Amino acid sequence: MQASHKVIFNTGITYLRSLITVFITLYSTKLIIKALGVEDFGLYSLIGGVVGMLAFFKSALTSSTQRFISFNLGKGLMDEVKRVVANSFLIHILTGLIIVLVVEVIGQYFITHKLVIAPDRLDTAIIIFHFVVASTFVTIATVPFDAVLNAHENMLVLAILGIIETVLKLLVAIILSYIVNYDKLILYSVLLFSVLILINGIKWIYCYRKYKETKVSLVKDIDISEIKSQTSFAGWNLFGAACSMGRGHGIAIISNMFFGTVVNAAFGIANQVKSQASFFSATILRAINPQIMKSEGANDRQRMLRLSMMASKFGFFLIAFIAIPLIFEMDNIIHLWLNETPKYAVVFCQLLLIGAVIEQLTVGIKSAIQSVGNIKKYMILTGGLLLLNMPVSYFFLSLGYKAEVVLYVYIIIEVLSGVLRVYLTHKIVGNLIGFYLKDVILKILVPTLFSIAACILMTRIKDLSFIYTFIVASSLFLLVAYFIGLSKNEKIIINSITSRIIKK
């Protein structure tokens, strides 16, 4: 399969997975909130926010290992690939143990002394925390398997496992709905941990049987120079991930100090909406990212830059077409989804979605800089800017501003971060700013304006269901994006894949 066709095929597979998991996850969340209640759901969202942190760490570690695997695959050096995987196993096991130790010590103190939690739920919060920490270790230790699957562009297996995991989480939600004589919050933590063990176990068995580079010796294949190289790159990647995590979970903790767990329930709902909407755009990055790394490994920087711009543009298209009507119709969506609207939920969902859409504009830029490997200065400056969310948010909340001010700060800093990412990557890679403005910004403007105009018009017409807003705005966005936002070659590739699918 040609590389361009493989990208589109993998995008389609992951996109289908996203469509399935979005609806199942949203329904599962509705059942979970009903089973646990708003207060306990807010408590789990607060403590389980470490899972959100875990997602950032996993993403950073996976992309770091994948970068080295894909880079060497691009050069055709299979012995190097095996050495990368072997040393990656050791690095991630040790990293998992260190993170568990640090998080256990700091986390328990923070829960018992700093967070606003009802005294009768404090013991439950500690138990939940232990399960979340255990989940952290399992996920980090199995990162090399995700990296191998991504580097080999095996999106089909990742999609199947993702769907199985989502269905199992739906079963967990259904089970909780029928439990009476047990602490549902503790049971929820136990069952989620069990699902995690099962999915990662299947992934380990598959990779071990499918890819020979996973059959390694942690003694024979260890290379200190390789460990130093991977650790340095992963360390700066982790720094960037930690800053992103601090931005996301940090503002939730600060909000809890001022408004209690009710505001964390709203954050939990908003993060669910954001993560499911982001699935659509994350598909394109998973499909294109290995090709970006391989292109740089093959010394084809022009192709690497083209793919990076394509990732940013497609990433924006695949979240904006659903996010824009969602933002305009959020009140109706939340009411239909949850039957009643928790405080802050609507405005939190709207603002987080705006931030997610803006973030996608530079998602390919991140991959470009990682493929080159010179990320130290980039991570320090962009990560430091993201961390400003916490002190700035605390400042405004201490002045008496409403809870949503933290997300206005989030959006403003995300815009500034995007500008900084483009500038720094231009300085390192070269010939980027003009390329980016022409191939990304100018291409997304017209479909975005058309979609916003359609939403404004549709929401002002009384007696129209929000479904009509979605149909009109999304269809118009995709139509304009196809004719104006895509290049001639991109249209040819999409048309070719579409015709092949129709024939089959």
Image (tube, rainbow, N blue to C red):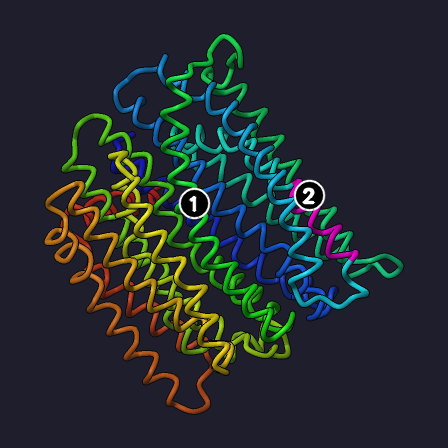
Q: Quadrant of the C terminus?
A: top left
Magenta residues, dominant SS class: helix
Q: Based on the picture, tell me whether residue 131 belongs to the magenta stretch.
A: yes
Task: Please state which of residues 344 and 485 is positioned toward the viewer in this rendering.
Answer: 344
Outermost residue, top side: 220
Instruction: Classify 238 as above or below 65.
Output: below
Using the rendered view, name the quadrant where residue 496 is placed: top left
In this rendering, does residue 484 appear at all? no
Task: Please state which of residues 193 and 31 is positioned toward the viewer in this rendering.
Answer: 193
Question: Where does residue 240 sit, x and y in percent of width and height?
Answer: 39, 46
**In the image, what residue occupies the spot 54% across and 64% down?**
252
Question: Where does residue 69 sit, x and y in percent of width and height?
Answer: 36, 25
Image disc number at residue 193: 2
Marks 2/1 in contact by CB < 8 Å: the verdict is no
The magenta span reads 123-134
Q: What amino acid is found at the position of numbered circle 1 in the picture?
A: Thr
Q: How many marks?
A: 2
Q: Secondary structure at mark 2?
A: helix
Q: Nearer the viewer, mark 2 or mark 1?
A: 2
Please give left or right for residue 326 compared with residue 305 in the image: right
**In the image, what residue occupies the spot 65% across and 45% down?**
105
Q: Residues within 10 Å of mark 2 (few under 14, many from 20)?
A: some
Using the rendered view, name the quadrant where residue 393 is placed: bottom left
- The residue at which mark 1 appears reads as 14
- Of mark 2 and mark 1, the one earlier in the sequence is 1
In this rendering, does residue 495 appear at all? yes
Q: Residues within 10 Å of mark 1 (few under 14, many from 20)?
A: many
**In the image, what residue occupies the spot 55% across and 36% down?**
140
Q: Secondary structure at mark 1?
A: helix
